[in-house]
């Protein structure tokens, strides 16, 4: 299964054809080599293994990011419960 993460473009380096992306508060670089359309600062894109795979609508991106945040919170809660159970 492949997972592409919605990310916001915060900078573009045309010399290296890369974008700086914000993904849930984490900044990372990604290649634009696989993009056939123009990418601009402020766009939401799908990030997969270091490559921008395509653009995504801002509303859809935000909905997806909210879902990821809910999953992360759920995993963190389960880990806390497991640690508490093991501490007893």
Image (cartoon, rainbow, N blue to C red):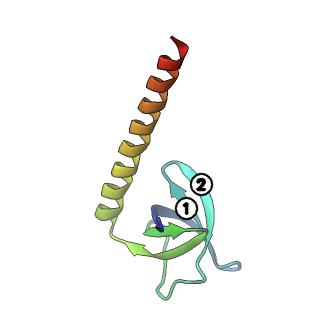
SS class, disc 1: strand
* Displayed quadrant of residue 87: top right
- The residue lying furthest to the right in this view is 15
Q: Mark 1 points at which residue?
A: 21
Task: Find residue 20 and report its horizontal and vertical position in percent.
Answer: 60, 64
| Of residues 36 and 64, the one drawn nearer to the viewer in this rendering | 64
In what element is the residue under mark 2?
A: strand
User: How many discs appear?
Assistant: 2
Asked whether the residues under the numbered discs 2 and 1 touch, taking CB atoms below 8 Å apart as contact, a structural biologist would say yes
> Image check: 31 left or right of 71?
right
* Residue at figure coordinates x 46%, y 34% from the top left: 76
Residue name at image x 51 percent, y 11 percent: 88
Q: Determine whether 22 is above or below 82 in the image.
A: below
Read off the residue under disc 2. Answer: 27
Q: Residue at x 53, y 19 (%)?
A: 86
In the depicted structure, whether residue 31 falls above or below residue 42: below
């Amino acid at each position: 299964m492949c997972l592409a993460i919605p990310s916001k473009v915060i900078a573009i380096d045309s010399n290296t054809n890369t974008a700086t992306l914000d993904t849930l508060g984490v900044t990372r670089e990604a290649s634009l080599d696989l993009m056939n359309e123009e990418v601009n600062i402020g766009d939401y894109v799908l990030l997969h293994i270091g490559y921008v795979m395509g653009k995504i609508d801002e509303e859809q991106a935000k909905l997806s990011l909210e879902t990821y945040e809910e999953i992360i919170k759920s995993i963190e809660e389960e880990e806390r419960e497991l640690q508490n159970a093991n501490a007893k």
